[in-house]
Image (tube, grey):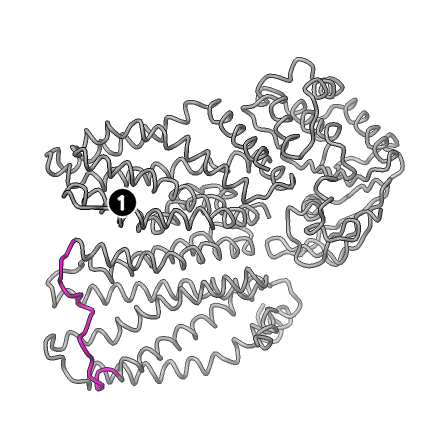
Amino acid sequence: MSGLRISGLTCVKRDRVLFEALNFQLMPGELLYLRGPNGAGKTSLLRIITGLSEPESGEVCYDDMPIASSHSFLSALIYLGHKAGLNGALSAMDNLQFWLAQHGTEVSPSGIYAVLETLGLVGLEDIPVRLLSAGQQRRVALSRLWLKPAKIWVLDEPFTALDIAGIAWLERQFKQHVDNGGMIITTSHQPLSENAGKHSTLDLEYRF
Amino acid sequence: MWKWLHPYAKTENAYQLCLTLQPWLWGCALVCLIVGTVWGLAFAPQDYQQGDSFRIIYIHVPSAILSMSTYIAMAVAALVGMVWQWRTAYMAMIAMAPVGAVMTFIALFTGAAWGKPMWGAWWVWDARLTSELILLFLYIGVIALYGAFEDKQQGGKAAGIMALVGVVNIPIIHYSVEWWNTLHQGATISKFDSPSIAPEMLWPLLINLAGFAFFIAAVTTVRLRSEIVLREMHRPWVKRLADESGVA
Amino acid sequence: MKHLLLGIARRDVRIAFQQKAELVQPIMFLLMVVTLFPLGVSPAPETLQRIGPGVIWIAAILSSLLSMDRLFREDFNDGSLEQYMLSGMPLSGVAAVKVLVHWLISFLPLLVLSPLLAMFLNLTLDMYVALIATLILGTPLLSFVGAIAVGLTVGLQRGGLLLALLLIPVFIPLLIFATSAVDSAALHLPYYSQLAIIGAMLLLAAASAPFAIAYSLKVSQN
């Protein structure tokens, strides 16, 4: 398992070079904490890693294959971006069941209820998602991490709208995932505490 | 075969190419336009049926033909940009677009102006004029779409797709409008069909056609240069260029 | 794969029926636009019959432009589109299914309303049959080709009017052939050739548009 390899990545957005010739590797069992001020290109980098955006040059490889031609990459990936990916008119259960079907994973309804229970969403599973608070919606989005068995977690500011207990809990989940051989890349505006365990850091600068 | 084109994927090389080509294009454009227009407006023989008013074809026909060719050139540039991921291709497409739109407008204006002495009406819904009008809408759509994007690279790709959709539709639109015209006007001959054109009338037309083509190319190179400099403002070669020419 | 695409269809249908009010608005718009013509032009039966096919088709195009915007906007804004793109399903398949579902949901009310429209504009039965035939073949064409432009404008703030600017020139051939078919029906002339041309355009669009739509969505996501 050679993990994720990023080589020579250059990103240009709105004719501004965000980062140039970026190289790094992420192996199973590693947590990478991406740091940088607003506008430095953290979200762009994450989106390029998932394949949603095209870089100006360079490539992202998983298991030594470019992600565009890798058959296993998407099934091994969960991406949670700024947007929750939930339709407001449907309930959390509906949203998650549709999502699981699209991503080729089968989980019984009781299994989904159990995960939502661990996230503190008892009683909120069957009402339209738009009626939930921002923090509750974030938890529904996060529940995907325990519904689809995926090695790679790419998370853009996952702690948004979570309370202090929630943040600590999520950090412990990160440590558990990494200890089990998974890999995580995440950004956050606050530093990761020791709950998250050992992690490496990548700093992006704001370039003019 | 197209290897010689590859260096121009880099904006710096494309910029230099524009600089070298510009004086030649302007020169040829000026020569052809002066010769063609003067010959056509003053020296070509009068038309048997239409008298002197037909002379407007020396402006109308080249602009109409080239408005269509420029759209096709835009679509080719868009295709090159899409397939080979060249930024300069998208920039060239956007450089050409307003020029083509103005050509279309000239064609419409002169076409309508021709109608007044002939048919007594400022505007007739004849097949060719209607097709030109729709072509103008297609141009405006591409230009508007590009302008709506903050990220010009994204905008270039989006406008490129619309240009390709438009180019696929142009023959469909052309033939459907022609057919629609026959439905509603019966067998009137389109005023833009000339039975056969005498050589003394043909030459100034061809020279003007070449002249307009050089003109479009010349204006496009100017616009392409500005587009390149605007988009690549932060690159070192642009900064060097600005220092050398003593700007700011 | 078919099972997955059906899942998308079910999701879209369920979402659409959660917002029933929105489903009715395009059809009300169509009805009101059609009503403007007797008021603005003339209520004389002969005039209405003469302009009827054009009026209904123009109103259908305008109402379709208004409702098309919701094809991808909601999914784009709430992040569902991103998740589709990461699911491993071919985006062209997803797009095709969404367009078809959207078409069915918008077209069926139109079909139900059409006898009323035909009555308002004094169309004969022959004309009405031709009209329905052109609508069945032509409205999916509107949806497929329109979706390409919708994909491009989904990330823009004020996409609506720009969408109309982009699409109206492209819809003109369809308008010409559809109205000509109904006019021919009024004169008891055959109109198979017009229908065949519309059918050909529809097949071309159905085959190629999904890929163009997928590309447009990827450009917007960038």
- Is C192 above or below relative to B217? above
Q: Which of B108 and C189 is in front in this view?
A: C189
Magenta-drawn stretch contains B99? no
Is residue B125 found left or right of C153 in the rendered image? Answer: left
Residue B186 in magenta? yes
Percent of width and height locating residue B101: 36, 62
Residue A15 vs residue B204: left or right? right
Q: In which quarter of the image is the N terminus of chain C?
A: top right
Secondary structure under tag 1 reads helix
| Residue B79 rendering spot, x and y as whole percentages | 51, 62
Q: What secondary structure characterizes most of the magenta part?
A: loop
Question: Residue A111 placed where, x, y %?
Answer: 72, 20
The quarter of the displayed image where residue A198 is located: top right
- Residue range (magenta): B184-202
Q: Which residue is disc 1 drawn over? A: C178
Relative image position of residue A34 (x, y in whole percent): 78, 43
* Residue C76 appears left or right of A189: left
Please name the residue shown 64% across and 70% down the image.
B237
Between B103 and A59, the one lying in front of the other is A59
